[in-house]
Amino acid sequence: MPFPDPTLPAPPAAPQDLASALRLAIDAASRFRGATAPNPTVGCCLLDAEGRVVALDAHRRAGTAHAEAGAIAQARAAGTVGRVHTVVVTLEPCDHHGRTPPCTEAILSTPARRVVVGAVDPNPAVAGGGAGRLARAGLDVLMADGLPGCAALADGCRALIAPFAKRATTGRPYVTVKQALDPAGSMIPPPGAKTFTSEPALRLAHALRRRADAVLTGSGTVLGDDPGFDVRRVPDHPGRRRQLAVLDRRGRVPAAWLERAASRNLDAFRSDDIGTALDRLGAAGALEVLVEAGPAVLESVAAAGLWDEWVVIRKGRGAAPDRAEVRRRGGAVETLELS
Ligand SMILES: NC(=O)c1ccc[n+]([C@@H]2O[C@H](COP(=O)([O-])OP(=O)(O)OC[C@H]3O[C@@H](n4cnc5c(N)ncnc54)[C@H](OP(=O)(O)O)[C@@H]3O)[C@@H](O)[C@H]2O)c1
């Protein structure tokens, strides 16, 4: 679960093999997770014939250049586009006119001979489009899944677009639950406190917020803790606004509280049903929602099987560091030590 700062480092000068180039593209894309909705996060690394990085870029925000087009524009500006030999991209290039021209055309405007695709486009309307077009134009199109040493990276590419895939196929955002537990297994902070976890654990919680397009909570949490729900402990994507859905069937959360959330870049609304809230968030373009709620809402989410990723932050006993356990639906638990 990478949470790098949302800035791109300079690429390495040494030649890269395809797996390393795909890793660079994944890392570049990961930095912009939470910034691109309703578009997917995508990274692209252009290599010359010797494997040296010609350009590395990611899709940064809807309406701006896609990763491939951005990397190609970078190479063009640097006068190095003539060296492009291989395009390594985390998601199949698009072949349709949206807010920007098709990436297939941008690639075909370069001397590229080979394209490595990390994940196929999950959008049912366009699946297979870009890869097929490039192959028909004579480029060697390789799926990362079939390349030596790239199986886990291909999984990483699919994980990167899981929120986009969920919304494209169901209309609802990818649901990540964050649940902090004390050593006794309780979610409730001691009297007078809002939290019981360490600073590294809080930074993880804020990084989870940063990668989400919306937060979903319950009236119990709002009335008990008055949480801000904004991204504070890690750098946020510039100018980012998020939605905030508050489950509140009895209307106990004051309208003034919902209005004040706007000053924290949150567009808050009340809902009396989780499914309806998720539909509304998906319709508004959210790819991922972070559930930050108390035991009552979490039980409902679990009982209805509405989650895609469940992150448990366990407070360490005594001086032991806190740990995070990340479970993706149908996947193994990944454990992170938070120190
Ligand atoms: N450790 C953690 O990770 C964590 C995170 C957040 C909060 N908390 C703690 O949790 C405590 C609050 O617990 P809580 O359980 O009262 O908070 P909650 O789960 O955030 O909110 C519960 C309220 O949500 C409303 N709700 C609406 N739809 C619901 C649904 N489908 N299922 C369940 N509830 C629904 C209910 O009020 P209506 O009947 O009026 O709709 C219910 O009383 C606080 O002490 C807070 O500090 C801990």
Image: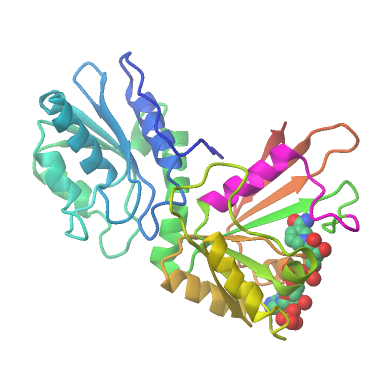
Quarter of the figure that contains the C terminus: top right
Please name the residue shown 41% across and 36% down the image: 26
Total count of labels: 0
Which of the 4 image quarters holds residue 62? bottom left
Quarter of the figure that contains the N terminus: top right
Q: In this picture, is 251 found above or below 105?
A: below
Q: Position of residue 261 (x, y in %)?
A: 59, 67
Q: In this picture, is 328 found above or below 8?
A: below
User: Would you say residue 333 is visible in this rendering?
Assistant: no
Please name the residue shown 62% across and 43% down the image: 233
Q: In this picture, is 71 found above or below 312?
A: above
Q: Is residue 59 left or right of residue 317?
A: left
Q: Position of residue 313 (x, y in %)?
A: 74, 46
Please name the residue shown 40% across and 27% down the image: 9
Q: Position of residue 138 (x, y in %)?
A: 9, 38
Q: Which residues are magenta?
A: 190-210
Please name the residue shown 78% across and 38% down the image: 322
Q: Is residue 173 left or right of residue 338?
A: left
Q: Nearer the viewer, residue 317 or 225?
A: 225
Q: Is residue 317 left or right of residue 335?
A: right
Q: Kindly give the residue lying farthest to the bottom in the view shown.
A: 250
User: Would you say residue 173 is visible in this rendering?
Assistant: yes
Which of the 4 image quarters holds residue 302? bottom right
Q: Kindly give the residue lying farthest to the top in the view shown.
A: 14
